[in-house]
Amino acid sequence: MAPKRPKTKVVRSLRRGIHNFGDLCIGFEELPAIKKIFGKETESVLGDLKVKVAQVKGYAYIDDSNGRIVISEQYLKSGSELYLTLDMIHELVHIKQWREEKDLFDEKYSYVDRPTEIEAYKIAAREAKRMGLKGKALRDYLVVDWVSKEDFERLLKSIGVK
């Protein structure tokens, strides 16, 4: 069975620079996961949020100096729509954490043990399951390129994915 696709769209044609979140991610305010993250503040948070499309390695991250999502121009152009959607959900969890003044890069923890990452991966994995990803497809989405197999397995256990 094909995954349930959300009624969202990621605009891949955005050029490098700073954009409104709504210019990049259309319809995200309707996703159950986003409503759960921000509650009544969903529309105002997403309406104020900026995204920077940049020539950077990797996928996406939060610039904790200004609370912007930074997304790799290459990933935006070549990543799957589903993965981009799920990664934006993951980053939106970090936006909430940033707004709560949590340390997104707390070096007391390894990446896979960091509470902020565990929370973001849990929510993204839950949404992936809601969209129909299961088993190997879910694990493939959750792969973290820069951690060991053992660390990845520990992350999966922490977020309740077998």
Image: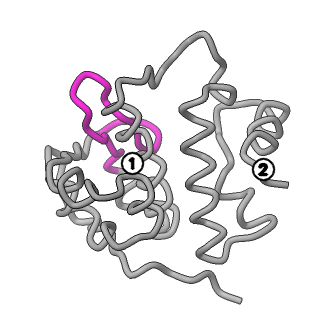
- State whether residue 107 is above or below residue 143: above
Q: Residue furthest front?
A: 40
- Which quarter of the picture shows residue 8? bottom left
Q: Residue 92 has which mark?
A: 1
The answer to which of 29 and 145 lies nearer the viewer is: 29
Image position of 61 with respect to 90: above or below? above
The magenta segment: 55-73
Q: Secondary structure at mark 1?
A: helix
Question: In the image, which disc is placed on residue 160?
Answer: 2
**Which residue extends farthest top?**
108
Q: Earlier in the sequence, mark 2 or mark 1?
A: 1
Q: Report the coloring of the rendering.
A: one colour
Relative placement, left or right, of 135 versus 9 is: right
Quadrant into which the C terminus falls: bottom right
* Residue 56 drawn in magenta: yes
* Label 2 CA crowd tier, 10 Å (few <14, some 14–19, many 20+): few
State left or right for residue 39 relative to residue 90: left
Q: Mark 1 is on which residue type? A: Leu
Q: Is residue 125 left or right of residue 8?
A: right
Residue type (three-letter) at the residue carrying disc 2? Gly
Q: Which mark is residue 7?
A: none
